[in-house]
Image: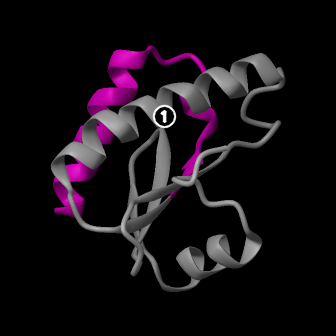
Amino acid sequence: MSKNSLRRKKDFGQVFAAGQSFYCQLFLIKVLENNLNNNRLGIIISKKSCKKAVGRNRIKRQLREVFRDKFEKTIKKNYDVVIIVSRNIVDKDFKTIEEKFEKLIQKIK
């Protein structure tokens, strides 16, 4: 795990309690400004969404890449971001995930 990830329950709780929510059919994004020098990301995906760990890890890798490529390059502020994955994401390709994430970034700006 890198320094750019949310790890503690307390950090997730702060984002859930005070963060803004942005929703699309594939995932929910909660965003909260922090006072650190970097953005931090937390991803929540349940076993109900994808039964196999291989599938869940693939989705996490894709979301981390989209976050790094789209969010961090367009929004320079310091944010804590939690992505809660929906069941609908399992059969989607990377391009679709990327497009949906971009649309949500436009709302966040």
On the rendered image, what quadrant is the C terminus found in? Answer: bottom left
**Residue at point 25% right, 66% down?**
77
Look at the image and give the residue range highlighted in magenta: 82-109
Query: From the viewer's perspective, is residue 99 above or below residue 95?
Result: below
Task: Name the secondary structure under disc 1.
Answer: helix
Q: Residues within 10 Å of mark 1 (few under 14, many from 20)?
A: many
Residue 45: x %, y % from top left? 69, 42
Three-letter code, disc 1: Leu
Instruction: State the residue position of label 1.
Output: 63
Which residue does the image show at 67% across and 44% down from the upper left?
1
Q: Which residue occupies the foreground of this view, 66 or 35?
A: 35
> Is residue 94 magenta-colored?
yes
Decide if residue 55 is on the left or right side of residue 103.
Answer: right
**In this picture, is 84 found above or below 6?**
above
Residue drawn at 63 percent across, 20 percent down: 58
Expressed as whole percent of the image width and height from the top left, the position of residue 43 reads: 61, 48
